[in-house]
């Protein structure tokens, strides 16, 4: 399944087009870089050059100004930049020298792509079908809480190698922002999902394991939500106590697949013999990758 991950996912994403025609995204977890190495997923669509951004010039500038040897893997207006120094050093230089270049994710295992457009358009633009890895988190969005822009599309990330997608609407994102801002946590959008993402990553950073962080999410995050989270080792799914936002899971010996509707799972191998179920409200479902 690792080699076919993107191929099997794309029909799932396209199958949810009616639920999210505005934008789409994908976070894929692959082989881990060495302990001292990191990679950034970058988006150039907000720069003056857009898809013609000079990515290789960027790596040359990093070498010249920071003495950083970097590798770049480019897909349209996205690129994955890999290097073996502190990511904060590189991110600070990028913000000072390329303020319109948007940093999508940071880590050793995660690559992230997201953009506006239908799921089929975004999947074709970044060749999602060729993606390989141990697991991934994808999303299609129908914007109700904030503008349709690439930075407000899902998945959202915070910290390193953590992502979250959300179906629903939170009623207290502003109180979460007020709580976390004094802790030095910076918010980039007005999207309610970002508040949930940064809250959960904050709990992980403070020492909670994923299950404890999610339990605190039940206590702190108010509203309607189905959350799917990814880390290098795990996938996790939770629904609010009312469970009004749909989710369906298919489990086999070979894979676990999760979608908003079964029609996005119907093409999967041997799905007729899968354990297919609707997750219960306020329950935690965690799978090891």
Image: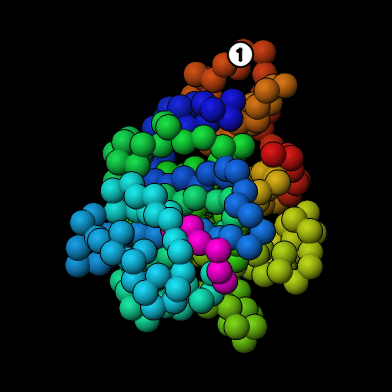
Q: Nearer the viewer, residue 99 or 199?
A: 99
Q: What kind of element bears circle 1?
A: loop
Tell me what residue is drawn at x 59 percent, y 25 percent. 1
Asked if the magenta segment contains residue 83, the reply would be yes
Tell me what residue is drawn at x 54 percent, y 28 percent. 3
Residue tagged 1: 270
| Left or right relative to 40: residue 280 | right
| Left or right relative to 38: residue 289 | right
Q: Which residues are magenta?
A: 81-86
- Residue 126 in the image, given as x and y percentages of width and height: 35, 42
Asked if the magenta segment contains residue 57, the reply would be no
Q: Quadrant of residue 65 in the image?
A: bottom left
Q: Nearer the viewer, residue 271 or 278?
A: 271
Q: Nearer the viewer, residue 262 or 95?
A: 95
- Residue 34 in the image, given as x and y percentages of width and height: 63, 54
- Residue 161 in the image, given as x and y percentages of width and height: 60, 56
| Left or right relative to 20: residue 271 | right
Q: Is residue 259 above or below residue 195?
A: above
Could you tell me if residue 252 is visible in this image? Answer: yes
Q: Quadrant of residue 17 in the image?
A: top left
- Residue 5 in the image, given as x and y percentages of width and height: 53, 31
């Amino acid at each position: 399944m690792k080699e076919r991950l993107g191929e099997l996912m794309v029909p799932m994403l396209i199958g949810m087009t009616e639920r999210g025609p505005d934008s789409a995204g994908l976070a894929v977890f692959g082989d881990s870089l060495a302990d001292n190495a990191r990679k950034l997923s970058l988006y150039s669509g907000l720069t003056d050059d857009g898809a013609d951004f000079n990515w290789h010039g960027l790596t040359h500038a990093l070498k010249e100004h920071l003495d950083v040897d970097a590798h770049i893997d480019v897909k349209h207006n996205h690129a994955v930049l890999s290097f073996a120094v502190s990511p904060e050093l590189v991110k600070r230089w990028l913000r000072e020298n390329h303020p319109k270049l948007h940093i999508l994710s940071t880590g050793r295992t995660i690559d992230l792509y997201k953009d506006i457009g239908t799921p089929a358009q975004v999947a074709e633009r970044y060749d999602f079908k060729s993606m390989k890895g141990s697991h991934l988190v994808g999303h299609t969005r129908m914007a109700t809480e904030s503008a349709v822009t690439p930075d407000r599309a899902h998945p959202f990330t915070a910290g390193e190698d953590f992502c979250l997608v959300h179906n629903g609407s939170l009623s207290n994102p502003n109180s979460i922002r007020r709580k976390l801002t004094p802790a030095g946590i910076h918010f980039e959008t007005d999207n309610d999902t970002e508040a949930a993402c940064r809250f959960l990553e904050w709990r992980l950073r403070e020492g909670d394991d994923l299950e404890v962080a999610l339990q605190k999410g039940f206590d702190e995050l108010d509203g309607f939500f189905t959350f799917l989270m990814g880390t290098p080792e795990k996938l996790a799914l939770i629904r609010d106590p009312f469970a009004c936002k749909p989710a369906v899971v298919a489990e086999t010996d070979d894979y676990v697949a999760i979608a908003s509707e079964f029609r996005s799972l119907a093409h999967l191998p041997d799905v007729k013999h899968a354990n297919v179920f609707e997750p219960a409200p306020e329950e935690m479902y965690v799978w090891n990758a």
